[in-house]
Amino acid sequence: MDTTWDDEIGGLLHELAAVQGELLGLLDEKRRLLVKTDLVGLAAMHDREQAIVGRLQSCHERRAQLLVQAQADALPADSIRSLAAALPVERAKPLRAQLVESGARWRLLQHQCLANWVLAQRSIVHLAQLLEIIATGGKPRPTYGNGPPSGQQGALLDQAA
């Protein structure tokens, strides 16, 4: 086996760890901006987000290249984890630790993304409720009942107003 496999995999995992760390910081900052409803700050994050997406894409492409090269060398090519496991134990041990850490960071990233998504969804529901209050003049029409419909009209949607 070529002695550079552990270096190649280690380099990929090192870059991935750096990108994951930056992404965690970015998601934390984004959550704080969502809580503060800082639209200017959120818009300013776009370029940083795109840079991280580019770096993640680069890691993905590098991973794919390593797996193609591994397949050409008759090594396991279904995942970086299986490729690292095929290395001699003394060379694979630090890589296994990096793989475990990377997996843990991905789970944390998934949780952070979900938290931000829930926060954004709640903001959307809040805005929808505000629009409904404005549209109906603050007096909701009864959903059920046999009586006549409410005589209240909203100024936003009614042309008569």
Image (tube, rainbow, N blue to C red):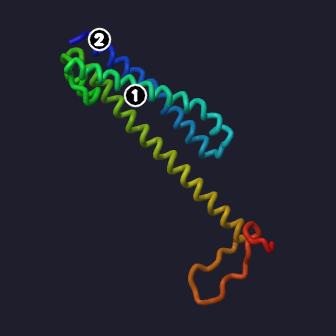
Decide which of tag 1 and tag 2 comes sooner along the chain: 2
Mark 1 near mark 2, Cβ–Cβ under 8 Å? no
Crowding at dot 1, Cα within 10 Å, few <14 / some 14-19 / many 20+, comes out as: some
For the residue pair 131 and 111, the one nearer the viewer reads as 131
The tag on residue 60 is 1
Q: Give residue 53's position: percent from left, percent from top.
A: 50, 31
- The residue lying at 45 percent from left, 29 percent from top is 56
Amino acid, disc 1: His
The tag on residue 4 is 2
In screen coordinates, is 64 left or right of 36?
left
For the residue pair 150 and 71, the one nearer the viewer reads as 71
- The residue lying at 58 percent from left, 30 percent from top is 48
Amino acid, disc 2: Thr
Above or below: residue 33 compared with residue 97 = below
For the residue pair 86 and 57, the one nearer the viewer reads as 57
Q: Give residue 141's position: percent from left, percent from top.
A: 64, 77
In screen coordinates, is 85 left or right of 115?
left
Above or below: residue 112 compared with residue 93 = below
The answer to which image quadrant residue 57 occupies is top left
Crowding at dot 2, Cα within 10 Å, few <14 / some 14-19 / many 20+, comes out as: few
SS type, badge 2: helix
* Cα distance in 3D space between marks 1 and 2: 19 Å
